[in-house]
Image (tube, rainbow, N blue to C red):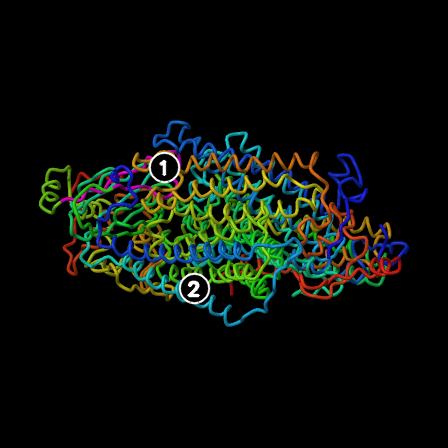
Amino acid sequence: MSAEATSPRINYLNADYGVRSWLFTKDHKRIALLYLGTITVFFALGGLMAALIRLELATPAGDLLQPDTYNRVFTMHGVLMVFMFLIPGIPAVLGNFLIPIMIGAKDLAFPKINLASWYIFTIGGLFILWSLLNGGVDTGWTFYTPYSTSFSNTHVVATGLGVFITGFSSILTGLNFIVTIHRMRAPGLTWFRLPLFVWAHYATSLIQVLGTPVIAITVLMLALERLFHLGIFDPAYGGDPVLFQHLFWFYSHPAVYIMVLPAMGVASEIFAAFARKRIFGYRFVAFSSLAIAVLGFLVWAHHLFVAGISVYAATVFSVLSMLVAVPSAIKVFNWTATLYEGSISWETPMLYGLGFIGLFTIGGLTGVMLATLGIDVQVHDTYFVVAHFHYVMVGGTIMGYLGGLHYWWPKISGKLYPVFWSKLSALIIFIGFNLTFFPQFLLGYMGMPRRYHSYPPEWQVLNVLSSAGASILAVGYLMPLVYFAWSMRYGKPAPANPWGAVGLEWETPSPPPTENFAEIPVVVGEAYDYTQRNYRFPLRDHHEVAHV
Amino acid sequence: MSEMSHGHEPLPGLAHHFDSYDQQRESATLGMWAFIVQEVMFFGGLFVTYMVYRREYAAAFAAGSHHLDVKLGAFNTAVLIASSLTMALAVRGAQLGKKKTLIGFLIATILLGSVFLGVKTVEYSHKWHEHHVPGPHFVFESTGVHGEAIDPHNARIFFSLYFAMTGLHALHMVVGIGILLWLIWQASRNRFTPNNYNYVEGTGLYWHFVDIVWIFLFPLLYLIGRH
Amino acid sequence: MWKNFPLFPPSASTLSGDVDAVYFFGLAVAAFFSLLIFCAVLFLAIRFRRRSPDEHGTPERAIVWLEIAWSTIPLVIMLGMFGWGAKVFFDLHRPPANATEYFVVGKQWMWKFQHPTGNREINELHVPVGAPVRLTMTSEDVIHSFFVPAFRTKADVIPGRYTTLWFQATKPGTFALYCAEYCGAEHSRMIGQVVVMEPRDYQAWLVRGSATQAVAASGADLFGALSCNTCHRADSAARAPLLAGIFGREIHLADGTTIKADDNYLRESILNPAAKVVAGYQPVMPTFKGQISEEQLLQLLNYIKTMAAAPAPQQAALGGTEAR
């Protein structure tokens, strides 16, 4: 059913050589690889911070780092991971690469803006890197006032500027995706024939465009307050430090859906491909993505339940937070149902998909626990929250990201990676992850607060388990770095469709030519159709018929 | 490497990844609207902060507002509205393929925008001399509109928001003028045709948006408690 | 073994059980659905393993009633969790009327307590068992958070305003207190303890302690020393409103709105009197910002709250209290 073509001699990777051909490219596929490079660097730095944290916390006493240093380490861990890895992550790498191909287009709507997005991202990252090399920031990635405006002696403004600049990269990527999906779909490709990966990125882009400007202005106000003592957040001037929290979380809550929606999009693709059938309840899953994006803007104050907001406001936000969990639940049930009567292969991407659905479920349900007011009072600002968000961001987003990389790597690189090592690293990551973060739920309910450098001795056993898990997890993350690099040089050439999957990206060679398709396809049916072929390439089909 | 319609010369001014001028124009327009939506959210953060503190410190805000020059503000409002008119006429010129009209109205828009910025500079320097710029030299000793005592700290918050909001707006004007200059340069090289004047149209949308932001800023900052 | 490897904090307040109950319910729901999905996914992934390389799955049409069911049932369960959690939350925020008020000032990196009797403590708070305790708290610098896991309660401590928290201890003992909002270098060491004592022991401890003066009495001194009584007195009611019984009352302001005279309103009226002027009065009250510390403010507030309906005007005859 799928075209078995070997790599053509000319593809987007070898179409042009030299540093300039990469740094001035307009090809969305090359830009995706530029992002892959820089994002991996930031992930490694953030991971280094994490290693320091878990090393320190293996013993109750604060004996590895000075308290001040520890505070900078956990802050930089958060800033690097959230702003420089998780938020751009899947959209910038996989979204950029795949969306034009999945909709049968030659590129995104605004290729030059796409390149500009990468430069903006990198420049913002350089500010943060500069700050890191000059001692970092010690406010926590949440920058709460008045500590960040009037008390911290670190490079708050530089880091804030880095976040501000990187935010525009996110906005422009979202804008590009929205216009592309609206205007550049191939003939016959109606909205409900789109892959769910595209739906997920559309919803993500809505959040990026609407939400990111709010963190931008908030960080700007923070910087102005710090530099000129405006008084907006300083109680000595009549300012309200809690106002900062409202403004901050108005973006930062939807931001977590920027992180997880694309991973859900990847999960949909993986389940469809490795069960070889259409996603059960396609329209429900598509609409759920939109529902998550919309509802995600209405729940921000569940981060402020103990910050002194009125009990009535707290009640409203608690209910809304329950509502936002429903579309996620719908997706989980639909993915599960997809497996029924499927033809399931346990290849590496599917291992990540299965891991994703389990870990995201745990993360999401503990989120519902946090949304429950009576529970949140006890566990707010404890390791319970830390465990929750790592389950959804690492167990969710990173599993989705790695699953997507493993699924589309043959398409992106034209090479196959070693199966045994990839399955082994998936298993190591799953085990390491759970060992690292499950004990933290227990620590949280017992009362271990977040951002603690030292702790009472009775909490050591759980902390040691967590740190042991972290070392296993680190090994698991290093392995793909090694074998993906290895595959670029020594991997077997990949066919156009190594998985026997259905999708426009599998209709073009691995790696694709610069213009993606020799001929723009026409779509005549729904996505993930394993019973009949829904793509037409009139000229190619005519040519093949004529020559039979 | 073949085009969709085999062997055609690529159409002038049509990017390689678009199929038609229509698709290109619709994409550009949708893109600019999306950009404007995010600008609304950007300014929105400041407007929300303004609303919170105006409600909390109504008297101080009114007192601060009375120290702004309403005449200059109103003049600036008229100037900006006029510049939106010249901008719209520039877009029309591009639409009709009239290069001289386009360039002429672009120049007019730049001039009016510059007048606006000049007046703002004058206003800012007044504020500096009256020690109303938040910072180490801030002083506010006036009483309120009805003679009540005003906490200078609260007035400071008003002026902080005044400078933040009008400053951000002015920055958008400066960027806008820069873009207009670039448009003049491109227009002089015959870049824009009735089939493809998307950059002019997009800039027009942006300019009108910046104008509308000012139309909100003027009453909120200059006209508090005035009759 | 469990003493050195606990899985649960001690249960030491009247609401600990309620919080634990809703927590266990949430945990049960989370565990149930997690296991459900885990098992279903694993089972299906094995049961429907691919048997030959070209095999594909059998698609089904969407089953709408199923979609509705698995949307509605979780929603109902979650709304139940919400309701239960909200009830516990309300209880955590509704101190009994007879709660004794203690005063807390958090600062980098210590907790300062003051008993109504005037006893002061640092990082340690002694309270009697079985009596409701209400804490009125503020910060001198950055945001902190007062957290006692054994009591299952927590509240942020914010500069520039008051927040409250209440508990009633159910058994004697020493219970850990943590700062739960990152506040700078020594955040991890801003810890203390709540020492719960039998009532008799508590009284004895109070007497032994270093109480100079009851908080209300300190407040009375300040009221005189700062000359509040020159305007806020019964015989010159034209100049300033009477403060007796004012706490908790609805106040009509000069701009036509009404406000409830709570802790934060009283505090603001001392520090920024022009912000909310009472209807019928001139805005002539001077500000005391910069002349009075957080603890002194708390003492004044406490005094105002204890002013009975017919106050004896305190003259500034009690000397010796510096207004700083």
Residue A33 visible within the image: yes
| Amino acid type for the residue under numbered disc 2 | Pro
Q: Which residue is mark 1?
A: C187
Image x and y of residue A233, in percent: 44, 47
Element under disc 2: helix
Tags 1 and 2 both on a single chain: yes
The C terminus of chain C is located in which quarter? top left
On the picture, is C279 further left or further right than A265?
A: left
Front of the two marks 1 and 2: 2
Amino acid marked by disc 1:
His
Q: Which residues are the magenta region?
A: C176-197
Q: Is residue A277 above or below residue C172?
A: below
Residue A411 against residue C243 in the figure, above or below: above
Report x, y in % for residue A161.
57, 41
Q: Nearer the viewer, residue A56 or A365?
A: A365
Observer-nearest residue: B43 or A11? A11
Residue B53 seen in render = no
Between C93 and C6, the one nearer to me in the picture? C6
Considering the image in quadrants, where does the N terminus of chain C appear?
top left
In the figure, residue A439 lies in which quadrant? top left
Does residue C173 lie above or below A337 as drawn?
above
How far apart marks 1 and 2 lie (CA) works out to: 39 Å
Residue A38 among those drawn in magenta: no
Residue A302 drawn at (x, y percent) = 42, 55
Q: What residue is shown at x 57% (from left), y 53% (from top)?
A: A267
Q: In this rendering, would A455 be left or right of A89?
A: left
Which subunit holds the residue at mark 1? C
Q: Which mark is residue C74?
A: 2
Residue at disc 1, secondary structure: helix
